[in-house]
Amino acid sequence: MTDTNQRIVLAARPTGLPSETDFRVEEAPITEPGAEEILVRTQYLSLDPYMRGRMNEGASYAPGVTLGEVMVGGTVGEVVTSRHAGFTEGDIAQVHSGRQAYGVSSGDEARKVDPALAPISTSLGVLGMPGITAYFGLLDIGRPGAGETVVVSGAAGAVGSLVGQIAQIKGSRAVGIAGSDAKVSWITDQLGFSGAFNYKTSNDYGAALRRFCADGIDVYFDNVGGAISDAVLPQMNIGGRIPVCGQISQYNLDVAEMGPRQTWHFIVKRLTMRGFLAFDFAERYDEALQELAGWLQDGRLVYKEDIVVGLEQAPAAFIGMLSGDNTGKRLIQVTE
Ligand SMILES: NC(=O)c1ccc[n+]([C@@H]2O[C@H](COP(=O)([O-])OP(=O)(O)OC[C@H]3O[C@@H](n4cnc5c(N)ncnc54)[C@H](OP(=O)(O)O)[C@@H]3O)[C@@H](O)[C@H]2O)c1
């Protein structure tokens, strides 16, 4: 083990889409773990849209990162030193030590990962936070029924690609909205979505939705908000459910767009729209992880990882993900 840590800190607060100069790559000494803590060598780092909000000064559901501090992020890697009874050296732990090669974490907050179950990178994707988000958001809030139509935006991303597949496993029809023809082909040809369209080449979202959702929409899993969501609302069926998972179309705006102004449809159709955080379901994570692992093992659930090699690539890979250059779960491979 080297004595030097490589880490990426927040250098400036962005306006609009972040740029690479908002981050700085630094070298620093590796911190020693204290009582009840573990030191983990990062193998994979997760890049997620919520990190854009953490670059801002104010708090949303969590405080922003202080300038000069390590950018936040979920990681998985090998325990190199343990001062916690639950971990020994060589264990694989999923922690939140951020964009750095070595991180100290509370052992109580770390999750032990079984490398025999699936590649350890999945603990940041299908068997981690995105999987849990898709599972509870769709099944607990969306409650899709057999034969119902589920529309998901951000459909070729980490969460959206799982939402559509889980909907199909439950006997619903999944229709996806994504930002390229290749993404549309992937979710329909490989993942079994019943239909999908490219919102970047469609000039009439309503017509595209009517084409794939002839019987209306029962569940809308909203990852993006904005004009896409405005087009979905009028096509919801009576009693429709809308889990609001993310609003990525708004994250880089300095002034939030107005809306929705289609709330009349909530009355006529008796719609329910509910925002949620994956953490709301913390007591039930095992339930989701077991069922997702079962679907993976019997081949009913497929996942894609979009892996970029090298910690120093994290700023560009993060900015690219916000702009849609990822398919499936974007990760940084920090070490072999
Ligand atoms: N509530 C929770 O607990 C929770 C947990 C995890 C994630 N989320 C939210 O869920 C959403 C998806 O997260 P993820 O981790 O799965 O990310 P992701 O979908 O893997 O990556 C982000 C994707 O967003 C799409 N996008 C970017 N700008 C857009 C725009 N203006 N309009 C429409 N789509 C746009 C891009 O795909 P295209 O090529 O299709 O544009 C991009 O690939 C995000 O909004 C995130 O904040 C919420």
Image (cartoon, helix red, strand yellow):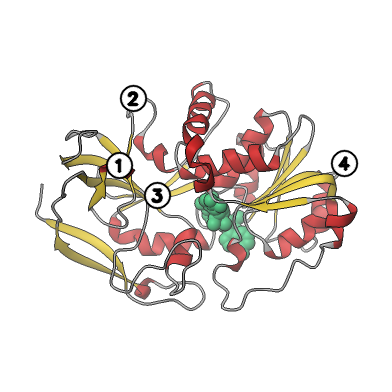
Marks 2 and 3, Cα distance to the nearest angstrom?
20 Å
Marks 4 and 1, Cα distance to the nearest angstrom?
48 Å
Left/right placement of residue 32 relative to residue 110 reads left
Q: Residue at x 52, y 40 (%)?
A: 132
Marks 4 and 3, Cα distance to the nearest angstrom?
38 Å
The residue tagged 4 is: 215
Q: Which of marks 3 and 1 is in front?
A: 1
Q: Disc 3 marks which amino acid?
A: Leu
Percent across and percent down for residue 142 are 69, 42
Is there a contact, CB below 8 Å, between mark 2 and mark 4? no
Q: Which residue is drawn at 26% across and 47% down?
A: 106
The residue tagged 2 is: 116
Q: Residues within 10 Å of mark 4 (few under 14, many from 20)?
A: few
Marks 3 and 1, Cα distance to the nearest angstrom?
24 Å
Answer with the quadrant where ligand 1 appears in the image: bottom right
Percent across and percent down for residue 92 are 27, 36
Q: Disc 1 marks which amino acid?
A: Asp
Q: Which of 288 and 1 is in front in this view?
A: 288
Mark 4 vs 1, N-terminal side = 1
- State the image quarter where residue 305 is shown: top left
The residue tagged 1 is: 108
Marks 2 and 4, Cα distance to the nearest angstrom?
44 Å
Is there a contact, CB below 8 Å, between mark 1 and mark 2? no
The residue tagged 3 is: 331
Q: Is mark 4 within 8 Å of ligand 1?
A: no
Mark 4 vs 3, N-terminal side = 4
Mark 2 vs 4, N-terminal side = 2
Q: Residues within 10 Å of mark 1 (few under 14, many from 20)?
A: few
Q: Disc 2 marks which amino acid?
A: Ala
